[in-house]
Image (cartoon, coloured by chain):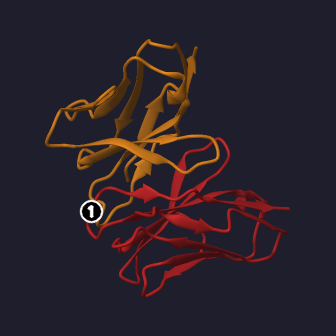
């Protein structure tokens, strides 16, 4: 089955700097890659997702890149703000209709003001 | 539009008891997913229901079960509770055959 590795487990950046979180997946058939942000005491919130027919997607300060050949995808947050501090999870799925999302173990991002 | 709702927010049980957790999906969503998030760990897939049927199941023992009602709400039952069942249980919903899952706030279960 699918296995998703996420690095780093913790990340501290100065406010205004960029943050990058990387994930690798094992199943080459996976074709959907969402990223979730989980704040303390809340459920995960979808922040961006990418499908395997595109290599990059951007939404304001957040971008995700996908390298299908290397089987890895990354989350990029630019101009970080204190409210970006949270735990971020990547996930991969072959087809949500028949297989579940497989999540990485999360990255705790701290943005220092 | 209301998001995914879960009840109760917190639940305290003792070993051997049964726990029932409830989830209401976003209006129009027919698929409901359950995940377990133990402290310090990622999200582990438990169960997936769609149109009232169990479609997929994660690597959990049979004492974890559930069902989906005609209005697409769902409940998760955990029998014979063990200490290691203490975790945040998250419910997510999606449109049928859609890839995007939206999560509720979770139910925090504590087994003493």
Residue at horizontal 43 percent and vertical 70 percent from the top:
B32
Q: Nearer the viewer, residue B57 or B23?
A: B23
- Residue B4: percent from the left, percent from the top? 48, 64
Residue tagged by mark 1?
A: B98
Residue at horizontal 39 percent and vertical 33 percent from the top:
A23
Which shade is chain B? red
Counting other residues with Cα less than 10 Å from the Cα at mark 1, is it few (<14), some (14-19), or many (20 or more)?
Answer: few
Left or right placement of residue A99 versus residue A53 in this view: right
- Residue B43: percent from the left, percent from the top? 53, 51
Q: Is residue A82 above or below residue A88?
A: above
- The quadrant holding residue A11 is top right
Left or right placement of residue B9 versus residue B26 in this view: right
- The quadrant holding residue B26 is bottom left
Q: Nearer the viewer, residue A69 or A90?
A: A90
Chain letter, orange in picture: A
Q: Is residue A37 above or below residue B98?
A: above
Q: Is residue A13 above or below residue B88?
A: above
**Mark 1, secondary structure of its residue:** loop
């Amino acid at each position: 089955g699918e296995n998703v590795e996420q690095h780093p487990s913790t990340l501290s950046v100065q406010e205004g700097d960029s943050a990058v979180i990387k994930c690798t997946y094992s199943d080459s058939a996976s074709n959907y890659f969402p990223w979730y942000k989980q704040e303390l005491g809340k459920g995960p919130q979808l922040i961006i997702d990418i499908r395997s027919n595109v290599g990059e997607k951007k939404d304001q300060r957040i971008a995700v890149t996908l390298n299908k050949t290397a089987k890895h995808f990354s989350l990029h947050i630019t101009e970080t703000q204190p409210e970006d501090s949270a735990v971020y999870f990547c996930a991969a799925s072959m087809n949500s209709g028949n297989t579940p999302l497989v999540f990485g173990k999360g990255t705790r991002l701290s943005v220092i003001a | 539009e209301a998001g995914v709702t879960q009840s109760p927010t917190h639940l305290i049980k003792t070993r051997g008891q049964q726990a029932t957790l409830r989830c209401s999906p976003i209006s129009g969503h027919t698929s409901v997913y359950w995940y377990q998030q133990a402290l310090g760990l990622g999200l582990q897939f438990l169960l997936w229901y769609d149109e009232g049927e169990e479609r997929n199941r994660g690597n959990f023992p049979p004492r974890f079960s559930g069902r989906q009602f005609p209005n697409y709400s769902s409940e998760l039952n955990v029998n014979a509770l063990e200490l290691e069942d203490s975790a945040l249980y998250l419910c997510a919903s999606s449109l049928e055959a859609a890839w995007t899952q939206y999560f509720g706030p979770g139910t925090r279960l504590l087994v003493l």
